[in-house]
Image (cartoon, rainbow, N blue to C red):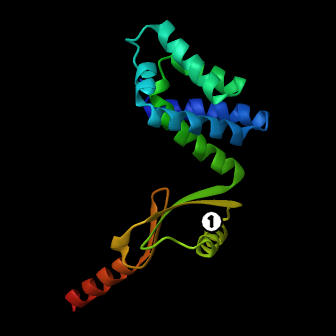
Amino acid sequence: MIGSKTLAYRYARALADLGLAQDKLEEFGRELASIKELFESVPDSAQILKKPLFPKDKRELLLSEIISQLNLSQITSNFLTQLLEKNRIEILNLILESYQEIVDQLVSRIRAKVFSARPLLDEEKNKLAQTLKRRFGAKDAVLDCKVDVDLIGGVKVEIRSVVFDASLKNQLARIQSQLVEE
């Protein structure tokens, strides 16, 4: 049996290919993200769609209402209908993650989680984005900034599975480690 991540990647790749052909990569990404947001804000709707135990006609009606409420494109509507018919709605979050990764590669975009001891100023965010774009050869950088007071100062940046830790907390820990070794 195919793993969920592999299956999600295949669905995401198919949607990305359609998006690329129709010049709607970003639009489809926004639509998938809006569905995820809806599922997070109304978890019951996601649960009903994910459970094949609920009558199929009720799940189809709910999906139709969601599509209408979010004013989704025909391609995304058809995509979701296929997911429902194949009982694959439960991997929608994995599909969205894979879709974002595929689109990011296609448009040369890098995504980073940034942790700092205090909220970063717009100027600092822009400088960090420019640095990351240069370092990774990307055309665009999307920063997801969060405050972590435990860092004391500096920043910690996570890009995929790579962590760049320039926090004061990490620097103090390294100094402490060096002092203990001596």
Q: Quadrant of residue 74?
A: top right
Q: Which of the pair 40/87 is nearer the observer?
A: 40
Q: Residue at x 42, y 19 (%)?
A: 48
Task: Residue lying at the far right in this picture: please name it.
Answer: 22
On the image, which quarter does residue 80 sit in? top right
Q: Position of residue 5 (x, y in %)?
A: 46, 35
Residue 17 lies left or right of residue 114; in this view the side is: right
Q: Is residue 85 visible to us here?
A: no
Residue receiving disc 1: 136
Query: Is residue 86 rendered to the left or right of residue 31?
Result: left
**Residue 111, percent from left and from top:** 57, 57
Question: Residue at the spot x=45%, y=26% of the render?
Answer: 46
The kind of secondary structure element at disc 1 is helix
Relative to 48, is 102 above or below? Answer: below
Does 140 appear above or below 125? Answer: above
Q: Is residue 41 above or below residue 154?
A: above
Q: Residues within 10 Å of mark 1 (few under 14, many from 20)?
A: few
Residue 28 located left or right of residue 101: right
Tell me which residue sits at (47%, 30%) in the image. 91
Amino acid, disc 1: Phe
Image coordinates of residue 142 in percent, x first then y, are 61, 58
- Left or right: where does residue 88 sit relative to residue 26? left
Q: Where's the N terminus, which quadrant?
A: top left
Is residue 103 something one can see in this rendering? yes
